[in-house]
Image (cartoon, coloured by chain):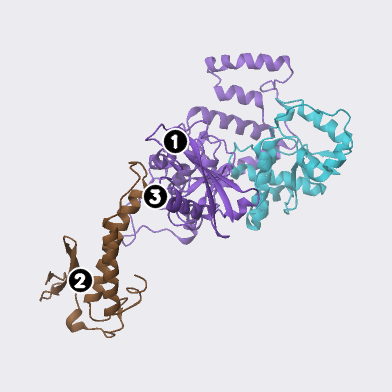
Chain colours: A cyan, B purple, C brown
Amino acid sequence: MKYAFYPGCVSRGGCPELYPSAVKVAEKLGIELDELKSVGCTGAGVLPQNITDPINARTFAKAEQLGLPIMTICSTCTGVMAQANYRLKEDPNYREKVNKEFLADEGLEYKGTTEVKHLLWVLFEDYGIERLQSLIQRPLKGLKVSPFYGCYLRRPLKP
Amino acid sequence: MEVTFKVYRKDPEKDGKPGRSNYALELAEDATVLDALLKIRDESDSTLAFRGCCGRGYCGECMMRVNGSARLACTAKVPDYTKRGPEISLDPLRNVPVIKDLVFDWDAFMWNKIKAVKPWLEPDDSPVNGEPLASEAEMRDLRKVMSCFYCGMCDEGCTVLPVDFDFLGPAALTKAYRLAFDPRNKDSREQVKIVEKPKGIWDCVHCYEADEHCPRTIEPTKRIVALRDRAFNSGITHEAVARHHASFAASVKESGWLDEGRLAVESEGLTNVKGLMKLLPTAAKALTRGKAPIPYMHSKRPDADKIKKIFEKAEQEEK
Amino acid sequence: MNEKAGLIRSGTGLQEALGQIQSLKDRYSRLRVKNPSRIYNYELTSYIELGSMLTLAEVVALAAGARAESRGAHQRADFSERDDTNWKNHTLVSFVGDQGNCRRSQLLPGKDRKRRFSWK
């Protein structure tokens, strides 16, 4: 299992425990990570789409070149990129326009084949719960947990 | 089939305290929740108050919570619920003032807010042959927004309204979008200026619950985001928001990624001593835990220049 | 109403309908609303609407009974032709007390674009 790793801005900034812990977890589980170092911020829903869609398309194109799906560790990155990806995949004319105007200069082209997955989805869908269960060393039985994973983990909702 | 409905009751003419009434019914296999309610009112309890009109998912009146989730009662098929259990609970919408039983206050919930965004077109003064015209292509996207039938599902799903009922809400903001983006509107800045104020577009947390609740795929959050982009690009933003955006944009443009330290400082304003002082306790705590990104001590990403090029080109195009 | 004042009407059918409407009106006059509420009282609104529906049913049956011709959506089995000589006019039903009666309009002569008429 290999992924193009997109750590995002905050896991290297105000939440610096996230990056190394994600890397350690991946290592332990045998998930190979190829970090995308020369790509830009997703815009986090703050910057307007006309600016962030091209920047994200570039990120997707870079992952496409590696032939790997993208793995994120931030809910916001996941949601924003998944939505941008949806727009670029759904409308080939739009994708062509973005490719021509923004990516062609660098010799890049996004063909629409990249997937974006958060680490939690990777664990749930690709790695598998049973496999994870077999690796448990210290069970957290008896602990009352209230999970907060960020709603952007589930956007856009699949029909 | 035999079904028991547990219906929320509230009588403003008695003590106004919420209660519940149970009704056991015999229903046809294709009955909807609205069918059941009408049967209850006709045959068992004529005091039960609920709204319903078209009975076919067209008018949006019978909005209520069936087993906790908001939906139109006339399209809620009873067998879909009874396969999970013989009881169905019915409640009015959450966080909305209830007038009586399942009837809630539409004015407070939605109508007042829709009225507040100036929901009418003021065409410009140069109609062709007495008619302000818009092309098919211009109206295509708008037609989707115009299919809103004010069911209130988006407001019901909103995660801000329970916390701040004065928030305009996705329904009203979508209405503002419909007018601000109509090519026939004389001054589309009117609606943008109204919704740019507090309790408007900037109070949306863009959780996208509205988009997931809308039965007509109008995508209210997408419309709110479009209004934000328009507000920002036409310079109609109040200062705190503008500072935040400008700072975010600047660090992404210059280095390819976000400088959070810089964002915190510049959002308050470099000359806003009071605001900056307020940040100090949090900054100190973060520093001791190694979690404070030092503002401006921010490395550039490799390829930052390429990202900058894209950024600038996109900015140019918007103009 | 569907049966006797629906797509195809007849004099006898409409007379029968008026008789049935009258007996329904009698029953209606004996109705009492049990629910005394002043807020969202659907029993009360149903009562008021039922009264209006009965009035309207009577109006429809009376007017259809009076118009001895077929015209547009008003099709009489016993008068299947259109009669422009006698029936090119409006019909007005009014009530004196509980009694409904029917009048016809008469087009006033003149080349005025705004057609003026009086009630016979």
Q: Which mark is residue B185?
A: 3
Chain letter, disc 3 residue: B
Q: Is residue C84 above or below residue B272?
A: below
B116 horizontally vs A118: left or right: left
Front residue of A35 and A132: A132
Residue under label 2: C91
x, y percent for residue C100: 19, 66
Between marks 3 and 2 in the image, the one whose residue lies nearer the viewer: 2
Residue at the image position 45 percent from the left and 60 percent from the top: B135
Quadrant of the rendered image containing residue A2: top right
Q: Chain of mark 2?
A: C
State whether residue B130 is above or below residue B71.
below
How far apart in space, not on screen, are marks 2 and 1 (Cα)? 48 Å
Q: Residue B99 or B83: which is nearer the viewer?
A: B83
The label on residue B97 is 1
Left or right: where A51 falls relative to C13: right
Question: In the depicted view, which residue is nearer to us: A29 or B56?
Answer: B56
Left or right, C6 with respect to B278, comes to left
